[in-house]
Image (cartoon, grey):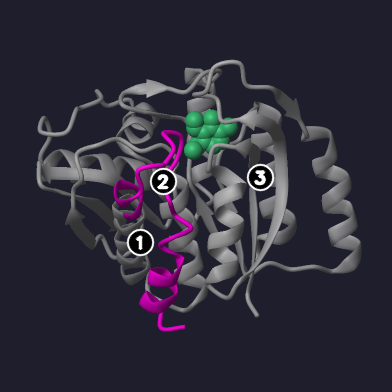
Amino acid sequence: MKRIVSIQDISSVGKCSLTVALPIISAMGVEAAVLPTAVLSTHTAIPGFTFHDLTGEIRPICAHWKKMGYTFDSIYTGYLGSFEQLDLVSEFFDDFGKDSLIFIDPVMGDYGRLYSGFTLDFVREMARLCARADVIVPNMTEATFMTGLEYREDGQYDLVFVQDLLRRLCDFGPKNAVLTGASFNPKLVGIVGLNAESGEFFSYMTERIPNSFHGTGDIFSSAAVGALMNDFSLSDSLAIAADYTLECIRESLKDPEARDYGVNFESAIPYLVRRIGK
Ligand code: PXL
């Protein structure tokens, strides 16, 4: 069985980061190991959240894993909370990443704004970490902050702008840069990617449901890395992740009790398992 290690926080309530990555990756028939970077009561968009940093645990955990000789087929990083954590993740890539697929979701913001606690210096260091990835999956906010291009709302950019953005992201060094939440038509949303080596662009669009849902980025990334570990190509994995994310949103819209802090990704798990032929 393939094994992914996911490095990000655990937000106890709120359907994001590890509470999403663990069930999705497991449902896809892949072992989900975790390196939790912090424990929060909820994600940071919910007022009054608590935050307990776990940076001090990272080195001892890694030392134990090294002693045991553990290896990972993929390293998937999400929300990281400090410069020190970026350095430790880079060390983790040195120690465990030689034969693994490195998948970085540079979680830092959305809708043109950085999440609480993030700074431009942090964005610059996250861009440096992205250099080491096989795949990076920023949204428009994260991609424009990392490249220094001006943020554009949907409807205010075209394919030429996105291709320029992706080339600039690939200039940092990742093997593939993928813009998530790309939309050139109000009825469609999806991804546009660039393979740095071949210079080939790829894209996949699905129906756009015009509400905003928290946590869909983490759902998308978890499903994408899970599909990669099921030996789908990168473009097929991103298509599976986009279709699953849409299905999660549809499930939430069907449920009158759906919470406003996350989508019903649980009800769409059977769809995902069917979609990957398991
Ligand atoms: O969904 C991304 C995410 C992950 N972890 C924490 C967050 C967020 C987004 O707000 O606050 C703690």
Secondary structure of residue under mark 1: helix
Q: What residue is at 66 percent from the left and 29 percent from the top?
A: 41
Q: Which mark is residue 90?
A: 3
Amino acid type at image mark 3: Ser
Looking at the rendering, the stretch of residues picked out in magenta corresponds to 251-278
Number of other residues with Cα within 10 Å of mark 3, as a class: few under 14, some 14 to 19, many 20 or more: some
Q: Nearer the viewer, mark 1 or mark 3?
A: 1
Q: What residue is at 78 percent from the left and 34 percent from the top?
A: 54
The picture quadrant where one finds residue 248 is bottom left
The residue labelled by disc 2 is 263
Mark 1 vs mark 2, CA separation in Å? 11 Å
Q: Are marks 3 and 2 in contact (CB under 8 Å)?
A: no
Secondary structure of residue under mark 2: loop
Magenta segment: does it hold 270? yes
The residue labelled by disc 1 is 244
Amino acid type at image mark 1: Tyr
Most foreground residue, 2 or 11: 11
Amino acid type at image mark 2: Val
Looking at this rendering, what residue extends furthest in the bottom direction?
277
Disc 1 or 3, which lies upstream in sequence?
3
Whether residue 268 sits left or right of residue 187 in the image: it is right
The picture quadrant where one finds residue 80 is top right
Location of the N terminus by quadrant is bottom right
What secondary structure prevails in the magenta region? loop
Q: Nearer the viewer, mark 1 or mark 2?
A: 2
